[in-house]
Structure formats: structure tokens, C-alpha cells
Image: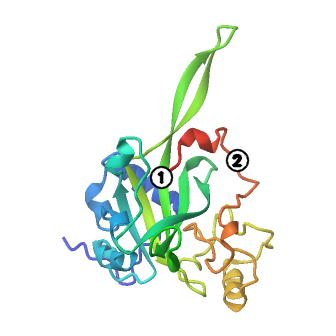
């Protein structure tokens, strides 16, 4: 049976798909053969970012804009330490604040953190155009409790899965890329900061014409990277917010 992709195939997942399908199936050891064709395992933090495209999965090697990898938990993390994000020539540094990944019905699926690669040694490294979105899944567990009236109630306790992260690596561009221009059908957050409800095509054209236009986000979860980084994590106030605090998730 021929498993070659149809002409024009491009791996184009939304954030919800990345977390709820690819990452969760990876964590549960399901659909491994098919997932491996689009997202391979790689110790991404020990590899220079410009070398990552050659390690892309079988069906994504022709992509010139974004590359996906599963990164396993490091040994030092398993022992309670912080992850080492230093390569031979530089280091990955977090920017902005973590953000939630939501499902289409506004459930929290995971957490996203944005990284920028710096060449040289911290803290005096030189910022590059290489960026990465790091996704981790949140598992909600029920903790039964008993009230004074002896009626049982259930508290939701979030658990951040550490076994694997899913990373999307890309290069900052001065214009909208293909995954920025993805149609916003059903998107929960077409605009993050005071933008009007215009079409995604109009938003892409505005972004290409001026660097002062409002931030836009595609269904793949990326902001227009030439905008100010401190807007990366502004949340849509209309979405249902989780009941827990960031500290409960022990983010590193």
C-alpha cells in the first residue's frame, strides 16, 4: 500500500490538535507509527536550531517554515532540577508568560511557553530569529472530598504531564507566513488586543504592510512575531479561565 502523501500535503495542525491529539497520544503510547511520520522524537535542547530542519519527520522534510518535535523529559528534571536548554553555541530563553491551550469548547488542554534562541553565553547572548513554542499537556484529576453535610463533592486538580513536550520551531519573519494566514474558522481568539472583527485575509495584509498593526493569531497559535513580545501572552477575556493558579502547575 502506498503511504505517500497527496500532492500539496502540508502538516498544518492547530494548537488544539497538537495537544489533544498528537501530544496526548504520544503520552499514552498510542498511534505511534503514524505520529512518528510527522513528529519525531529529538533531544531538541542539545541541538543547534539551524540543524533541526534536517531532523524533521518523513512527511515534513520539505517544510521551510516550521518543524515539530517531541522532546523527552531530561534526567535532571526527573530528579527535581530545572531543564537544561543550553546548546554548544547558545541557549533557549523563555519570553513572556506561559499561556493556556484551549479546546473548541473552552476546556484547558495544556500550557504553551515561547522560547527565543540566543547565541553566546547567558546572560549576554545575542538574540536570533529562531523561536519555539513548547507545549505540555494538562491532565485533570478528580479528588473526592466530603462536606460537613456528608454530601460528596469533587475538586479538580490539574496535573502537568512531564514525560514529553511538543515543540514547534520556526524562524521569525518580517511578513506573515503560511501558518499565520490560516483561515480563522471557529477560532476562539482571532485578535488578542483590541483588533476589530475583520477577516483573517485582511489581518494578514495589514500585518504585511505595517509593523504597528494589531497582533493576530492563527489557529496554529502563533502571533505575528514582528510585534512586541510582551503581547505574546495576553489572554482572551471571553474564554473560560481555569480554577487553579500557575504555581500549582510547577512550570519550569
> Which of the two labelled residues, at mark 2 and mark 1, occupies the earlier sequence position?
1
Seen at 70% across and 81% down, the residue is 203
Classify mark 1: residues with Cα within 10 Å, few (<14), some (14-19) or many (20+): many
Left or right? Give the position of 194 relative to 185. right
**72, above or below 218, in the image:** above
Q: Are marks 2 and 1 in contact (CB under 8 Å)?
A: no
Tell me residue 235's x, y (percent): 70, 58
- Most foreground residue, 120 or 7: 120
Seen at 44% across and 75% down, the residue is 120
Quadrant holding the N terminus: bottom left
Tell me residue 72's x, y (percent): 34, 54
Q: Quadrant of residue 209?
A: bottom right
Can you name the residue that lies furthest to the left here? 1
Seen at 51% across and 80% down, the residue is 128
- Most foreground residue, 47 or 209: 47
Left or right? Give the position of 134 relative to 5. right
- Most foreground residue, 11 or 121: 121
Left or right? Give the position of 172 relative to 51. right
Classify mark 2: residues with Cα within 10 Å, few (<14), some (14-19) or many (20+): few
- Most foreground residue, 152 or 93: 93
Seen at 25% across and 59% down, the residue is 33
Tell me residue 95's x, y (percent): 59, 65
**62, above or below 149, in the image:** below
Q: How is the image coloured?
A: rainbow
Which of discs 2 and 1 lies nearer the camera? The answer is 1
Judged from the image, the secondary structure of the residue bearing numbered disc 2 is loop
**Alpha carbon distance from label 2 to label 1:** 19 Å
Q: Quadrant of residue 220?
A: bottom right
Residue tagged 2: 240
Judged from the image, the secondary structure of the residue bearing numbered disc 1 is strand
Residue tagged 1: 136
Amino acid at each position: 500500500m502506498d503511504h505517500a502523501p497527496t500532492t500539496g500535503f502540508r502538516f498544518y495542525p492547530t494548537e488544539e490538535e497538537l495537544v489533544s491529539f498528537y501530544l496526548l497520544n504520544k503520552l499514552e503510547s498510542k498511534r505511534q507509527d503514524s505520529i512518528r511520520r510527522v513528529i519525531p522524537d529529538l533531544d531538541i535542547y542539545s541541538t543547534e536550531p539551524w540543524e533541526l530542519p534536517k531532523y524533521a519527520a518523513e512527511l515534513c522534510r520539505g517544510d521551510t517554515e516550521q518543524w515539530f518535535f517531541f522532546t523527552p523529559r531530561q534526567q535532571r528534571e526527573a530528579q527535581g532540577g530545572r531543564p537544561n536548554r543550553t546548546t554548544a553555541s547558545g541557549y533557549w530563553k523563555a519570553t513572556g508568560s506561559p499561556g493556556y491551550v484551549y479546546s473548541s469548547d473552552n476546556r484547558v488542554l495544556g500550557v504553551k511557553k515561547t522560547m527565543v534562541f540566543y547565541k553566546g553565553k547567558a546572560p549576554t547572548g545575542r538574540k536570533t530569529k529562531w523561536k519555539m513554542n513548547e507545549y505540555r499537556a494538562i491532565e485533570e484529576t478528580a479528588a473526592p472530598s466530603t462536606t460537613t453535610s456528608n454530601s460528596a463533592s469533587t475538586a479538580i486538580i490539574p496535573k502537568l504531564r512531564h514525560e514529553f513536550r511538543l515543540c514547534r520551531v520556526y524562524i521569525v519573519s518580517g511578513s506573515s507566513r503560511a501558518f499565520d494566514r490560516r483561515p480563522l474558522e471557529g477560532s476562539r481568539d482571532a485578535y488578542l488586543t483590541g483588533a476589530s472583527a475583520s477577516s483573517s485575509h485582511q489581518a494578514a495584509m495589514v500585518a504585511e504592510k505595517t509593523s504597528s498593526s494589531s497582533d493576530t493569531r492563527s489557529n496554529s497559535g502563533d502571533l505575528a512575531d514582528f510585534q512586541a513580545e510582551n503581547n505574546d501572552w495576553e489572554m482572551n477575556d471571553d474564554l473560560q479561565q481555569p480554577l487553579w493558579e500557575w504555581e500549582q502547575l510547577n512550570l519550569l
